[in-house]
């Protein structure tokens, strides 16, 4: 029972961090490299609440690397502001990771469509 409560707590903390981090990046980070289309897709918080891995999806491919560099350099600022907004004894250290799962999903969908088209044209020939 206690483990389930622990997981629920880390999930709640992860969702709070996700919401606040996105708000802070959009409103308070003044780095021009962060002015692009992005979304925080997921946050994983360790059970000891020391680290939070923040997965960021950047829609414009050419802006991914500059955005990730900007986030890594602003991690302390973002963490400090999260600490002020979310009531935690210890604010986790933020580790930003590029999330390419959306792009991968689009790629897989296009491959499936190609297979369907070739199967459809083969069945028309028969």
Image: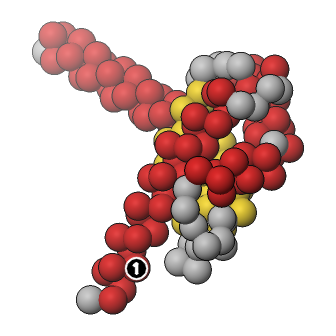
Residue 85 visible in this rendered orientation of the protein: yes
Quarter of the image for the N terminus: give it. Answer: bottom left
* Figure disc tally: 1
Q: x%, y% of residue 69? A: 83, 38
Q: x%, y% of residue 94? A: 70, 57
The residue under the point 37% across, 28% down is 109
Foreground of the two, 114 or 125? 114
Residue 43 visible in this rendered orientation of the protein: no
- Classify residue 113 as left or right of residue 55: left
Q: How is the image coloured?
A: secondary structure
Q: Where, by quadrant of the figure, is residue 68 drawn?
A: top right
Foreground of the two, 46 or 77? 77
The residue under the point 20% across, 16% down is 120
Q: Residue under circle 1?
A: 6
Q: Secondary structure at mark 1?
A: helix
- Classify residue 124 as left or right of residue 11: left
- Classify residue 32 as left or right of residue 1: right
Foreground of the two, 24 or 126? 24
């Amino acid at each position: 029972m206690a483990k389930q409560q622990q997981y629920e707590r880390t999930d709640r903390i992860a969702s709070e961090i996700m919401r606040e981090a996105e708000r802070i990046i959009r409103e308070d980070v003044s780095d021009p490299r962060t002015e692009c289309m992005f979304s925080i897709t997921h946050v994983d918080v360790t059970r000891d609440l020391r680290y939070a891995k923040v997965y960021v999806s950047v829609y414009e491919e050419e802006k991914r690397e500059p955005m990730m560099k900007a986030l890594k350099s602003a991690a302390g600022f973002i963490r400090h502001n999260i600490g002020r907004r979310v009531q935690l004894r210890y604010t986790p250290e933020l580790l930003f990771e590029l999330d390419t799962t959306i792009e991968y999903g689009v790629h897989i969908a296009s491959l499936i469509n190609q297979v369907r088209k070739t199967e459809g044209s083969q069945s028309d020939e028969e």
